[in-house]
Amino acid sequence: MARDHDVAISYITGATPTRGPAAMRNAGWRIARGDVIAFTDDDAIPDRDWLRQGVLALGADAADAASGRIVVPLPDDPTDYERHVARLERSDFVTANCFCRRRVLECVRGFDARFRVACREDSDLLFKLIEYGFEVVYAINAVVVHPVRPAGHCSIHPRSRSWASLRGSS
């Protein structure tokens, strides 16, 4: 994929002072060279046009961050757990499909590495972006397919209600 789109991809490995997705996302964006940082999960499958659509959603410096659309494929007869995970499709901000300007991440000091379990760092980042007054948009055309991981990997929280209430919507 990188060769098709002239995108430089670097894989970073190694120990960080703390572990978990927040610490690794911080390590990644801090060594990245671009002005826009894109995040996805290791088991997510970005659409072929994902990066371009995320950058387009940010516009020419109009928005500070964007969250794209998540698609969670379910079997014909999903379990309660699989239905629960599929709520990602209705979440407003998930770091499995997220774009932030570098200056914004620097301002909010990135992710809180105390969150060592997946699915917590995204809510925290969103609330920091709102608290600092940054513009967060929805990138409907930046699509990531996120298969259901085995039970016990992540506790999903209904973030979309929290963001909607902060925005004054219902």
Image (tube, grey):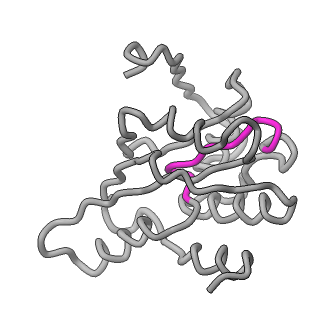
Residue drawn where x is 69% and y is 48% of the image: 65
Q: Which residue is most to the bottom? A: 170
In the image, 88 versus 25, the foreground residue is 88
89 in magenta: no
Against 81, residue 24 (above or below) is: above
Residue 12, image quadrant: top right
Residue drawn where x is 65% and y is 35% of the image: 37
In the image, 27 versus 157, the foreground residue is 157
The quadrant of the rendering that contains the C terminus is bottom right
Against 10, residue 26 (above or below) is: below
Against 160, residue 138 (above or below) is: above
Measured as percent of width and height from the top left, residue 78 is found at 20, 74
In the image, 137 versus 97, the foreground residue is 137
Residue drawn where x is 62% and y is 40% of the image: 24
Residue 49 falls left or right of residue 163: left
Which residues lie in the magenta part? Answer: 94-104
Residue drawn where x is 38% and y is 69% of the image: 85
Measured as percent of width and height from the top left, residue 4 is found at 37, 16
95 in magenta: yes
In the image, 19 versus 64, the foreground residue is 64
Measured as percent of width and height from the top left, residue 46 is found at 39, 40
Q: Which residue is most to the left? A: 76
The quadrant of the rendering that contains the N terminus is top left
